[in-house]
Image (cartoon, rainbow, N blue to C red):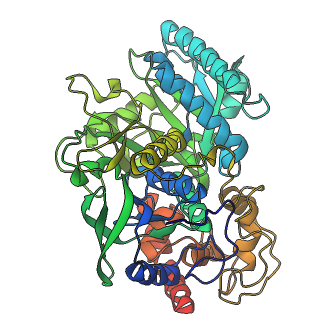
Amino acid sequence: MARTRRTSPPLTAAAAPGHPSALNATRRSHELDALAARTEPVDVLVIGGGVTGAGVALDAASRGLSVVLAEAHDLAFGTSRWSSKLVHGGLRYLATGDVAVARESADERHLLMTRIAPHLVRSLPQLLPFVPGVSAKQRVFGGLGMGLGDGLRMLARTPAQVLAHPRRIGRDEALRLAPALRREGLRGGVLAHDGQLVDDARLVVALARTAAAYGATVLTRVRVSDADGSGATLTDALGGGTLRVHARVVVNAAGVWAGELDPGIRMRPSRGTHLVLDAAALGNPTAALTVPHPGSISRFVFALPQQLGRVVVGLTDEDAPGPVPDVPQPGDDEIDFLLQTLSTALDRPLGRGDVLGAFAGLRPLIDTGGDGSTADISRRHHVAVAESGLVNVLGGKLTTYRAMARDAVDLACLHAGLDDPGCRTASLPLVGAAASSVAFAGAGAGAAGTGAKPVGHEPPASLTARFGAEASSVLDLASCTDPAAQIAEGIDVTRAEIEFAVRAEGALDVDDVLDRRTRIGLVPADRERAHDAAADLVAESLARLA
């Protein structure tokens, strides 16, 4: 049957009120009804709402294919929210000899920082300090590695104005960038730059919203069963019943849960643990600290300045056998290892009392059958058609999600015989990017479908860092009272952001807002302080949508 192919974002979202990129409870309900009434197969059914699944949905939808994405929990519920929030240039993979992954990482970092999401990725200074605990060998190889990383930057054609050349710096500059450094024996260090996301979950939401603007149906709280190459059974976890979705091709992008859909998959997840510290405990650093593992020239502990006045310290790489939990937990030995390693570079050693929060994520690594460490398993992604007909996309890393999605959709189109105009995502900006045609910016009053009136607030810098060109609209479209006020004292998240999460970003409850849209929940004490006010706003926003 001939189909009309979309070549640009639709002006209105089918069966959904408001702006075409808005994800919310009303749109979800309407799209479930439309899917139940559909008589012909969708082109592509994507299983998994992490960065890979959202990337696949956007890639396929931007090619003009009809797309349904089904996620059992929330967008970015799994591995995609537990990363170091770095957009790596591939330096570590050079050190292990994986040149192909290193080059691909640098190329994808270039696209994210210059075209796709420059509003969500910034240049982060990274300092390898020359303190007594860093050996001469580690200093030499660290400097050489940063030089090779700069070579990757140049091969990717990333301008030095975006990522500066590495350089040797003196003691005073090192202390200015990282005031908590150990002063005794400090001899400066090497300063390089890499990409850093304002937040990993925010990237996933931006991908999903952009896919929705291109016509994709994005469904959270929908469990998948009986999946094969012709479709899957979807069960609405919110009580909306069950339906069978027929598809011309099905892409399994379920990450560490991929084996539950295809028993032929052999995964070997590894756990990466991070700690959350108050930035003040490290003197409010403006550069990330890069401290080598004891005796290693290729693995490091990072202390990464983050939004909301936090520093995230990571990370480990430990085998995680057994059933895959919904929310992995850090191990005590991993917490101690991170504190002890970082402390070797600091004036004041860190202890458990400095830890405000901790989190762990599972890397979806492919089991290659070896007995070595998971740190030695390649991060190269794998795309293949399973015996069941599912197109599996496995492995990889957050930075290379777009290349993974491209390869998966290429294979899906070939496997199903779909008309394929080719991948467009290398030059397609996400919502919030200044060049995006699907962001709320400039949409005017009521763009989210609630009749809100502009209030003329100038967005704070933190809001612009999280929403880019949409920052003013987040405030102007708010219906809540005092939209620019903080959700709780000392927490740099506005009331307007809570409402926007519900009206435009697909949040269905307060957990979605605190744990994924705003990341307040990374610190349990902050979560507790903000919970009641956020819950009230979520309830009010949901009521306005009803």
Q: At which x and y percent is residue 114? A: 72, 41
Q: At which x and y percent is residue 440? A: 72, 70
Q: At which x and y percent is residue 454? A: 79, 82
Q: Is residue 394 above or below residue 475?
A: above
Residue 175: quadrant of the picture:
top right
Residue 243: quadrant of the picture:
bottom left
Q: Is residue 287 above or below residue 98?
A: below
Q: Is residue 155 above or below residue 499?
A: above
Q: At which x and y percent is residue 124? A: 65, 37
Residue 536 shows in this picture: yes
Q: Residue at x 32, y 63 (%)?
A: 231
Drawn side of residue 408 relative to residue 238, left or right: right
Q: Is residue 123 above or below residue 138?
A: below
Q: Residue at x 26, y 60 (%)?
A: 227
Along the line of sight, the residue nearer the viewer: 223 or 247 = 247
Q: Residue at x 40, y 77 (%)?
A: 39
